[in-house]
Image (cartoon, coloured by chain):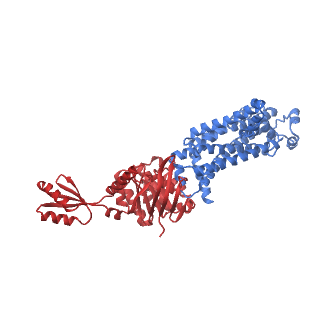
Chain colours: A red, B blue
Amino acid sequence: MTAAIKVTGLNKNFGRKKVLQSLHFTVPPDTIAGFLGPNGAGKTTTLRILLGLIPSYQGNLEMLGCNIPAQRVSALEQIGAVVENPTFIETMSAYENLYWFGSLYKTLLPARINEVIEMVGLKDATNQRFGTFSTGMKQRLGVAFGILHKPRLLILDEPTSGMDPAGRVHMREILRRIHDEEKTSIFLSSHLLDEVQRLCNYVVIIDKGVTVSEGFVADLLASTLEKWELRLVDEEIDRARGLISRLEKNISVSNLPRGLLLAMPAGLSAQVNSELVRAGIKVNALIPHEASLEETFIKLTSDSGDKGGSA
Amino acid sequence: MKRMLFLILFELKKILNRKKALLFLLALNVVPLVASLALLIAFVKFRGFGFGQIQFSVLYEIVQGLFTGHVKLFAFIAPFFLALVVGDSFSTEFSRGYMKMLLLTPINRWQVITAKTVAIMIFLLLAVAIGGMFLQADLLIARTLTQNSGDISETLLQSMPESVRNSLPSDAKPLYLVSTTSALQLLAMTFFGNLMLIGFFIVFSLFFESAILMSFTSLSVLMAVHTFYLIATGLLSKIDPVYNQLAQWCFTRHLDDLFAIKSIQNILEGKAGLLSEGIFSSLLAISFWTAAFYLLATLIFSRRQILH
């Protein structure tokens, strides 16, 4: 199947500053993909280039099989997008804004406007002026605008920025529903790693304009070290530490208030446990720490920073 | 095509939705509006209280002055308002993010600039049409006021061009002194003259994100160009004739030619029309400049980065 997004050798300079350097990534179809990177990594610039808001750059871009910029218009016919904060006409109501912006697509039925307004939970604000909307409502109307024409791909830039925790949960539910019910692939940039981990099954990580990593979230997490909390009697902590460091070189050990934190390759926990018991050390508990995207992200971006620094 | 139509309507709705749009329409037509009021008062005073009748010769001058004044004032103040309208349609939309939202929809950039230009043109046409409507109303009141006065002086009749004199009905009414064709030609001239300025302002608006700043800068440049034209054709040409050649490139000179009081009066008196030599060449030059500004704006806009 055609990739949702394919970026090859993307370079972009703002004056002398190199913002993107041979950026490349491929977002598979039917995924909810996260686009991660620290501040200034070049995420918004990449999205703006993809959507034609920045016309000058070097590189090859494809979205849903359409070459950008040659087939930009036909690509946008199948793509919904909101970059940064959505800004609609303040003096017009939610319905009016969707009607006028929606009329610029090939097909638009009034029933669809009501359907998307209801889908994003703005039914009560249908006739309310956009100028009176809260940040969360504005973001939700942005998503409504993005899915108005039933796109195959929805591109969102920081869709939950400025929203409270309840609003974020709601937005996550909306996006999951869009993906499941309307079969829309989603590509969203976000700073909130926890949110991306909960919502996305694919992730692209960039830093300083360079692709650091990309892949399915499950694969990415599996490649990182497992973390285990080892609870021990206080007197035996030092002995256990010595034993573990002799046992395996790949295990990193750090102190915790009532034991040790072990970071080790997958599958070693049972062996560690049995060695400790054999040495007569009482293991009160061996608790797995769920791997988080945050750790992977920090590790990957700091690695790329080190490389960048030494280069 | 349908999409383009929607885009133009959307842009027009945005322009007319602004409260200042109404203010602009009224300010641009201040002459015919005030004249309507004055004539209405005169109507009540003279007809209602039987103070006699206004002489035709007096009214002839009033009507002539009204048309000339309106066209002249419109030509003078329209650039100020048009700069702000263009600034709102482009510069303000860049800063507010409306332009970004528009460009996320499947439309080409040239379509955006065309739709916005057409919408501003319609706004201008509306302003011109409102002025025309009020002038027409003024003439109707004037006609009622002088009905049966029979006061067309011999001198005045002699000063009229023969075509106008022959077109007068036997019970000559002053209304016919400004024929519908003349009035329409004047309004069309006002429209086309300002069209060039719209193109000029659009080019500027692509570099600014504040409508006020853009208006201030573009109007300053406009005045600078015209001042150069005046100096170059006057003083400087005496020093070196090359200044005269340079001045020919000052596009504002065509507006000066077009809206010269002499041209306006010639049209009013039926002595000249849009196809008359001097006026037609000005209109042709204005069309050339309008097309050049529009093409330049499209080129700049196609390269512009939308970063807000």
Name the quadrant containing residue A222. bottom left
Q: Is residue A161 above or below residue B81?
A: below
Give the image quarter of residue A263.
bottom left
Q: At 34% across and 60% down in the image, what residue appears?
A: A198
In the depicted structure, whether residue A147 falls above or below residue B188: below
A13 left or right of A202 in image: right
Q: Is residue A300 visible?
A: yes
Horizontally, residue B137 falls left or right of residue A276, namely: right
Asked if residue B248 is positioned above or below residue A10 in the image, the reply reads above
Q: Is residue B262 toward the left or the right of residue B298 in the image?
A: right
Q: Position of residue A201 (x, y in %)?
A: 38, 63
**Image quarter (top left, top right, bottom left or bottom right) of the N terminus of chain B:** bottom right
The front one of A239 and B122 is A239
Residue A15 vs residue A124, the one in the foreground? A15
| Vertical comparison of B85 with A261: above or below | above
The picture places residue B120, in percent across and down from the top left corner, at 63, 47
B7 left or right, relative to B258: left
Residue sitting at the far bottom: A1
Query: B241 or B222, which is in the foreground?
Result: B241
Q: How many marks?
A: 0
Q: Is residue A125 visible?
A: no
Q: Residue drawn at (17%, 55%), measured in percent from left and top?
A: A259
- Residue for point 52% across, 66% down: A65
State the image coordinates of residue A133 (x, y, percent, origin top left): 44, 49
In terms of depth relative to the viewer, which is nearer, A291 or A124? A291
Rendered location of residue A142, percent (x, y): 46, 54
